[in-house]
Amino acid sequence: MKNNVMQALLFVGMLFFAVGCSNDSAAEEPVEVEREELELLLEKIDFDAEWEEITIQFTTNLPEETVVDTLALLDSNNTAVLELEVQNYSLQDSTTVVFELGEKDREGLPEEELSMVLTVFVDETTNTHFLSNEVIGGSFSDMQMHYADSELLQLSAGNQPNAYSFNLRSSNKKSLPEEIFEKAEEVVEEEEPTVEETAEAEVEVEPEPEPETKVETSEFQLVTTSDLKNNFDAFFGMKIEVKGEVTQVIQYDPYAMSDTAQSYLVNISDPNNYNADNSVWVEILSNPPTLFEGSKVTVKGTLLDTYTYESVMGTPITVPYILASSIE
């Protein structure tokens, strides 16, 4: 009888131990997070002829606290036909953006459907909610793995730990309003001049002085490798110009922003003080020029970020990233 009781107690103890181990094992199983795809929808494009302004309305599931750096409209060649640097612009403020055309020639704008793209930078001081929220963001590796095959979101690695940027393209396209392409024609009825008007016309009038010719300066600031190495943050997001020599024509760039894009490694060393480390990554979205290793070039574009690639030996190398508007 005593043996039976001991056996029963031993069985119960083993049962509780097995259940406890099962619970511990279940608790250690990772919980799969169901991600939410980031989306952008171009809702409306309006034109105010009086103020020469284009107003864009859009919707997105990006969190309201997200700070956007750049907003642009792209044509079918992925060329920015309108671009607005809206640094420190929060989606919490508005999802409506106004482009002031100013003296821009309206005839140069394309009569085709355009897509919209937002550029967002993420690091430990800006847009940190992406790093902590795995549903919409996560680390660069998390984002890279999830959006590897995406045509609407393109990633770039940052130059600091836990830093990256992404371009989110709208899933739809819209055309610019027809009023933009209409030329205003003012018809003035001609009247026969009176005798008094004819007499006044015969009076000699001193010619008005010709308006002074304004000297236009380049919007791109010429920088050197020393400028970028010693003061990168000061030129971040600015339109810059660099001169140098092509050291590599990139045959395949997995992070290219479009199918028509072409990337190059360009060394911008002082000709009298060459250093192999003085390279920049240059990407042009469309109509790339035919260049070869050793080609001398002048690049004009926007310093957007840094780019990390692997050397022939497999060593990661991080260099400034320039989105070029022209390469000559």
Image (spheres, rainbow, N blue to C red):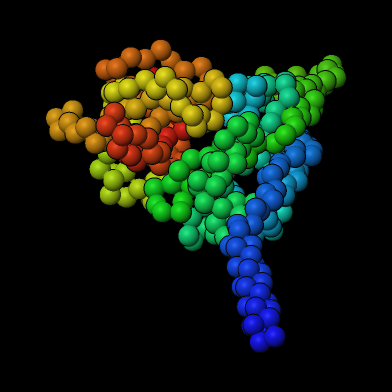
Residue found at x 72% / y 21%: 112
**Occupied quadrant, residue 258:** top right
> Residue 154 appears at what percent x and percent y?
56, 36
Residue 189 as seen in the image, left or right of residue 168: right
Q: Nearer the viewer, residue 106 or 38?
A: 38
Image quadrant in which you'd find residue 144: top right
**Residue 25 visible to the viewer:** yes
Q: Residue 75 sits in which quadrant?
A: top right
Instruction: Measuring from the top left, give residue 284's x and y in whole percent.
Output: 47, 25
Vertically, is 20 above or below 277? Answer: below
Closest to the observer: 139 or 82? 139
Quadrant position of the C terminus in the picture: top left
Find the residue positioned furthest to the top.
Answer: 290
Residue 311 location (% of width, % of height):
30, 32
Q: Would residue 111 appear left or right of 211 to someone viewing this image?
A: right
Point 51% across, 17% down: residue: 287
Evaluate whether residue 215 shows in this view: no
Residue at point 62%, 73% (across, down) = 14
Quadrant that contains the N terminus: bottom right
Q: Residue at x 71, y 54 (%)?
A: 94
- Residue 179 falls left or right of residue 224: right
User: Could you tell me residue 102's position as x and y percent?
Assistant: 62, 36
